[in-house]
Image (tube, rainbow, N blue to C red):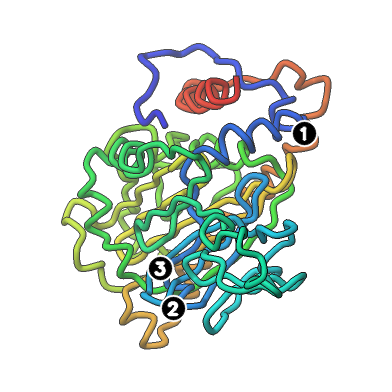
Amino acid sequence: MTTAPASGSTSLMATLPGSYYADPQIFAREQELVLETLWMCAVRAADLPRPGAYRTVQIGRESVLVTRNRHGELRAFLNVCRHRGARLCTEESGEVRRNLQCPYHAWTYDLDGRLVAAPNLSKMPDVGRVEYGLRPVALREWLGYAWVCLADEPPSFEGTVIGAATERLGEAAAIERYRVEELALGRRITYDVRANWKLIVENFMECYHCATIHPELTEVLPEFADGLAAQYFVGHGAAFGSDIKGFTVDGSAGFARLSGIAEEQDRRYYAVTVKPSVFINLVPDHVILHRMYPLAVDRTVVECDWLYAPEVVASGADVGQSVELFHRVNEQDFAACERTQPAMSSKAYKDGGVLVPSEHHIGAFHTWVRELTG
């Protein structure tokens, strides 16, 4: 992600061709070379509160199973039985008592992926219990979420994931002060967007559209009406309007400032993109985290969490006013992406479009995509 403006450029810049958003073969390459090689935010750790709790997520072409073992540690595996390839867990989420059992032939695995039982297994000494265990997937925890990577040799988590936040905010401490891993889930909304995942990333990275489609957001953050995105300058956070009391749909007061953030982070909004699929929004009293699951060339599921201080959620406080602000932003953005998707197949967009100067940082994202997919 580029967070500083192009060096004084006032010229237009070409976008990716329309085929990058509409061609299933290009999407297949992105699944293989982007989604299946980089760290992806899979599951909120608190969604798996006990040993045996699990959730399945689609990462690229693979179904990934994330569970918690008997020691309370998170584990991730390909959701595939090693016997005949049946889907091991067919539900999106659930909980087992001790083991994961394939519904086809009852091959059974413990919560660390080891094969522990199967019909007539004692008569098959050549079936190694470790060798035929579940295929593990690399997993790291950060910000209270489980991040997974399907690559045999994952890239540096510190360099790519934590590094994205550091590059955007100027220092790692800037996000650490929010103590996201200690926050509680106040609301979760899942959006099924009929658009290519890159259109959603590009939309989040720029604010040239904000004055046109985000009246509530530009009321709270007046500088967004000028078209410069929050990600345009390293360390910059968009300031609240002078008469705005909180990051809410009507500018009314929200909740007490999160205890760890610095004075200079108060009354400011920061946005971070962690490529390829995570958006982090930081405001004084809560954090909003989007994670995308690209499912098809023209379909992306986005799961959005609103996170608050634990005492706010425990008290039963109404978080509706703050949720509603970014829920409207999401609906406005996703509707714009869905209006754009059909034109990606038009001959009018065969060679792509253009980026205006305030969007030039998106050009770095396009370069990144091209470099990864060839």
Residue 194 at what x, y percent from top left?
74, 48
- In which quadrant of the rendered image does the C terminus lie? top right
Nearer-N-terminus badge (3/2): 2
Q: Are circles 3 and 2 on residues that touch, CB within 8 Å?
A: no
Q: Is any part of residue 339 visible from this angle? A: no
Circle 3 or circle 2, nearest the eye: 2
Query: Which residue is label 2 attached to?
Result: 49
Q: Amino acid at mark 2?
A: Pro
The residues bearing labels 1 and 2 have C-alpha atoms spaced at a distance of: 38 Å
Nearer-N-terminus badge (3/1): 1
Q: Amino acid at mark 3?
A: Leu
Circle 1 or circle 2, nearest the eye: 2
**Which element carries disc 1, helix, strand or loop?**
helix
**Which element carries disc 3, helix, strand or loop?**
strand
The residues bearing labels 3 and 2 have C-alpha atoms spaced at a distance of: 17 Å
Residue 186 at what x, y percent from top left?
45, 74
